[in-house]
Amino acid sequence: MSKRKNKAEKNLTAIPTSGEEAPKKINRKKYEAELEKLQVELVKLQEWIKHKGLKVVVIFEGRDAAGKGGVIKRITQRLNPRVCRVVALGTPTEREKNQWYFQRYAAHLPAKGEIVLFDRSWYNRAGVERVMGFCTEEEYREFLRSCPEFERMLVRSGIILIKYWFSVSDEEQERRFKNRIADPTKRWKLSPMDMESRARWVSYSKAKDEMFAYTDIKQAPWYDVNADNKKRARLNCISHLLSLIPYKDLTPAPLELPPRQKNKNYIRPPISDQTFIPEKY
């Protein structure tokens, strides 16, 4: 096991086994204070990546409702979308189905000075496509052979590749699914595939185990995130991400606003000539 993986395991809270007491919920005030500190560091990391021309790819995989979207949202919340972008691809088109499997993902890889966060990735083939029968056995086996080589190639090209797997217990996933069903603002998050994943829990577990056996490589290891507690998972994941890329603080000195241009010959059009939205609030 790599040193990097050992470091990750120290940073992440272990998933409690039977008989162990689950970690206590983190206080909201403490959570928000810690998150703010981490987001400041993320901005510093962003500036370092731009300055050094680094290329960073972070993959987020895991169970449905495990909290991948939540941590991605907190990572990007304070960052420049021109530097850090999220890729969440939908169902492949007919043309994409006839391409080399990795082709549509390769089109979204970063240039120098960019961070790309994959909200699910090429590992769809080893997960949903495998379990739901959307790919053939031959296509699946070829993926297991090709994926490690594809990722080694990315690393050799200079890409920093980081892979997170969000683990959530059966009970916690069920609680979150029920919460989404009850909340109209979250119901869109439940797709037919999500509902089917509940019925195929064991099949997904077996698929994940086999995927790890082939793709947990030294050049790009998998990092497990205990996601039963969303707030802890977000803090642990962001903290760990920051630990993987050495960076320096390039925060510029405070800026001074220049004086506003003086109004000489400019005459502002009447406000009545403009169309304003209704002020309901």
Image (spheres, grey):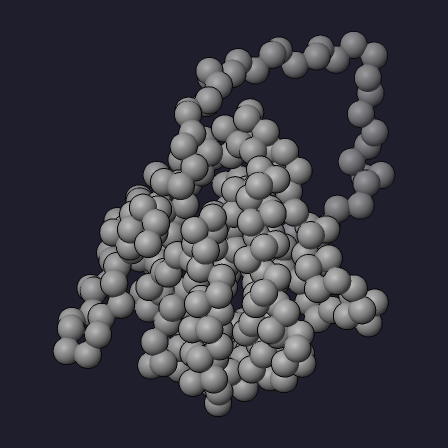
Q: Residue furthest bottom?
A: 199
In the rendered image, residue 122, in percent from the top left (x then y), is placed at 61, 62
Relative to 133, does residue 260 appear above or below in the rendering? above
Up the image or down, 190 lies above or below 45; here it is below
**On the image, which quarter does residue 24 sit in?**
bottom left
Is 15 situated left or right of 97 in this image?
Answer: left
User: If the image is split into quadrants, where does the N terminus sit?
Assistant: bottom left
- Relative to 156, residue 256 above or below: above
Q: Is residue 235 in view from this perspective?
A: no
Asked whether residue 133 is in view, the answer is yes
Q: Look at the image and tell me in which quarter the C terminus lies.
A: bottom right
**What is the tally of numbered marks visible in this picture?**
0
Residue 181 vs residue 38: left or right?
right
Residue 230 left/right relative to 103: left
Which residue is found at the position 31% from the left and 46% from the top? 3
25 or 86: nearer the viewer: 86
The x and y percentages for residue 44 are: 45, 31
Q: Nearer the viewer, residue 211 or 167?
A: 211
Q: Position of residue 117 (x, y in %)?
A: 56, 51
Q: What residue lies at 64% left-to-right and 42% top-to-bottom?
A: 110
> Which quadrant of the structure image shows residue 141?
bottom right
The one nearer the camera, 46 or 9, is 9
Residue drawn at point x = 60 percent, y = 46 percent = 154
Q: Residue at x 53, y 13 (%)?
A: 256
Q: Position of residue 68 (x, y in %)?
A: 47, 62
